[in-house]
Image: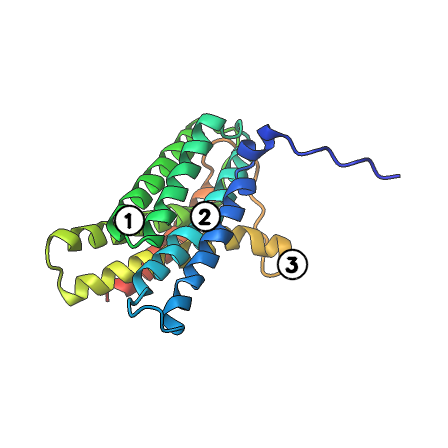
Amino acid sequence: MPSARRPLTFADLYREPFRLFFPAATLAGLLGVLLWVPLLLGWTTDYPGTAHARLMVQGFFGGFMFGFLGTSMPRLLEVPPFAAREVFPLLALFAVQAGAHLLGAVAVGDGLFVMELVLWLTLLKGRCHTKRGLPPPTFVLVGLAFGCGLAGTALFLAGRRWELSPELELLARLLSYHAFVLLCVLGAGGFLLPRFLGLGVRRKLPASATVTPEWRAAAGFAGTTGLLLVITYGL
């Protein structure tokens, strides 16, 4: 007979952050869609497009990406999982950020999203320094995605103080909405899809805690591809 499943414990919630961030991201996505209901029913004339876009990208997609990275990266790097003192402040930031966008305080939400990205990058970078294994080479694209998210959101915040040209406003949307999502999907999907769906070539790299020529070549190819994509947004 199969063994009984171990009951979920409180520690599982922060050691595997997807258990917290996936439901929170789903709720943010539902709220982002529901923003359109009052307008469609004629209860208001306020256009919710900006708040909707932020909730879908920073809330719905961002929450799923944060949960995935927070759970997978410690395992891939063979380092201890995140602690409660790290995960729960990030979850609180995420909740307040989503709430700010829901209430129309877009600048506050953008500022909190920048804080989230910086904190996640800091935590993940710290794990990389204590690694026993290497992350998948395609995860270089995830770092580039975070950089695009930071740059685009910084332009949004700058536009609150100074008048941006139409080109810069467009670039802010492209970096924040398109590049952030696309590069995260390519970075994570390049590792996951061949395993989940049996598609493409599964590159097998030797297990090592130090950068090998094979890993460097694969990461260089991924990074170059990502930079070329970012250049197209600029064009």
Check the image and report above or below for 234 versus 11.
Answer: below
**What amino acid is at disc 2?**
Gly
Report the quarter where the C terminus lies.
bottom left
Q: Nearer the viewer, mark 2 or mark 3?
A: 2
**Residue 228 location (% of width, % of height):** 32, 60
Q: CA distance from mark 1 to mark 3?
A: 38 Å
Question: Which residue is farthest left?
Answer: 162
What residue is shown at x 59% (from left), y 53% (from top)?
202
Please, which colouring scheme is shown? Answer: rainbow
Near-viewer residue (95 or 79): 95
Where is 120 relative to 43, above or below? above
Q: Is residue 231 visible?
A: no
**Residue drawn at point x = 28 percent, y = 61 percent:** 173
As helix, strand or loop, the secondary structure at mark 2 comes to: helix
| Of callouts 2 and 1, the N-terminal one | 2
Three-letter code for the amino acid on which mark 3 is drawn: Gly
Counting other residues with Cα less than 10 Å from the Cα at mark 1, is it few (<14), some (14-19), or many (20 or more)? many
Label disc, if present, on residue 198 of the rendered structure: 3
Question: Where's the N terminus, which quadrant?
Answer: top right
Q: Secondary structure at mark 1?
A: helix
Q: Which residue is at the front of the view, 73 or 82?
A: 82
Q: Quadrant of residue 89?
A: top left
Q: Label 2: how many residues lie within 10 Å, few (<14), some (14-19) or many (20+)?
A: many
- Could you tell me residue 188's position as x and y percent? 49, 51
- Where residue 197 sits: x, y (%)? 64, 59
CA distance for labels 2 and 1? 14 Å
Mark 1 and mark 3 lie on one chain; the one further toward the N terminus is 1
Q: Earlier in the sequence, mark 2 or mark 3?
A: 2
Label 1 sits on what residue type?
Asp
Q: Which residue is mark 1?
A: 110
On residue 63, the disc is 2
